[in-house]
Image: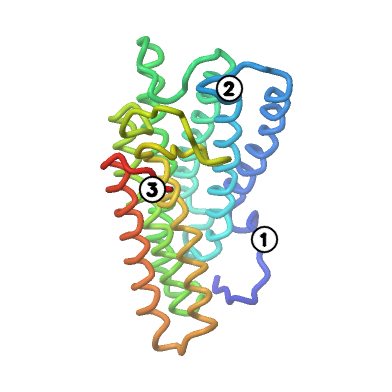
Amino acid sequence: MTLTLGTPARPWDFAPTLTALALFIALTALPVIAAMALDARQFDGESIWLKPLKFHVALVIYIATLAFFARYLPASWHGSSLWNGYLVIVTVSILFEIVWIGGAAALGTASHFNVATPVANLGYSLMGVAAVTLTSASLVMGIGIWRNAASGLPPALHLAVALGLILTFVLTLPVAGTMASNLSHHIGASVTGARLPILGWSREVGDLRAPHFMATHALHALPVAGWLFHRLLPAPLGVPAVVAAAAGFALLVAVMFAGALAGRPAI
């Protein structure tokens, strides 16, 4: 199926599994919000339910974005048993993340960097595998869209969508891997605990969550840039502009990553 920018399409027409998963995780955020209101326990100075809620929100945004971009995959993928089987694996990985993080909150313990017991160590290791698996969906879709000459997208936007999805995986993996091996978001010892509102990034020491956040949003930033280039630039300049934007975005993440490793706060 060939689509154009003006073609109306609903995510569930091209990605019913991803759409249903996004809706399910959005709905299951409601009990988490209720728990936050009723449960006064704190962990690391925040509501113990804040981390599960953040993951619900982040995963809904990520999955809904994949569902939206699925319309630009090759027509042969839709209904393919191989593609649908892969989506089942991704779905199980995402559900495991949600259950593990929410379960840790209910038990009053840490879901991340927790290797205090054999069970916690195993769960944390499995969560790492699940995280790589669910993030790999952006890489697989990016490659699929890149190779789909019948996407119906103009060249600049086509490349921007593909590169945004691919870079989400490529940039996220080393940052997330460093956090996992470091067993902490922070590089350095915080004294006052000063942090940014909402995001929670440290304002005193290096915080790997800053480059991680940027890396995971390449699939949003580059398509927006590609759309702007398509609208504002002459056609021959669109693709080079997207390549430059992708290189610049990757450089930005690398600089933020290096700064965090050096113990410097992002802000």
Write the residue at 50% across / 59% down.
220
Residue drawn at (45%, 72%), measured in percent from left and top? 158
Q: Reply above or below: 149 against 61.
A: below
Q: Earlier in the sequence, mark 3 or mark 1?
A: 1
The chosen color scheme is: rainbow
The residue indicated by pointer 2 is 48
Q: CA distance from mark 2 to mark 3?
A: 24 Å
Going 53% across and 54% down the picture, which residue do you hit? 66
Residue behind mark 3 = 211
Disc 1 marks a residue whose amino acid type is Arg
Quadrant in the picture for the N terminus: bottom right
Mark 1 — residue?
10
Q: Is residue 19 left or right of residue 190?
A: right
- Along the polypeptide, which appears first: circle 2 or circle 3? 2
Number of residues whose C-alpha sits closer than 10 Å to that of mark 1, classed few (under 14), some (14–19) or many (20 or more): few
Q: Which one is closest to the eye, mark 1 or mark 2?
A: 2
Q: Amino acid at mark 2?
A: Ile
Query: Which residue is drawn at the image coordinates 48% and 79% (left, top)?
Result: 229
Q: SS for tag 1? A: loop
**Location of residue 173 in the rendering, given as x and y in whole percent from the top left corner:** 33, 44
* Residue 160 horizontal/vertical position (percent): 43, 69
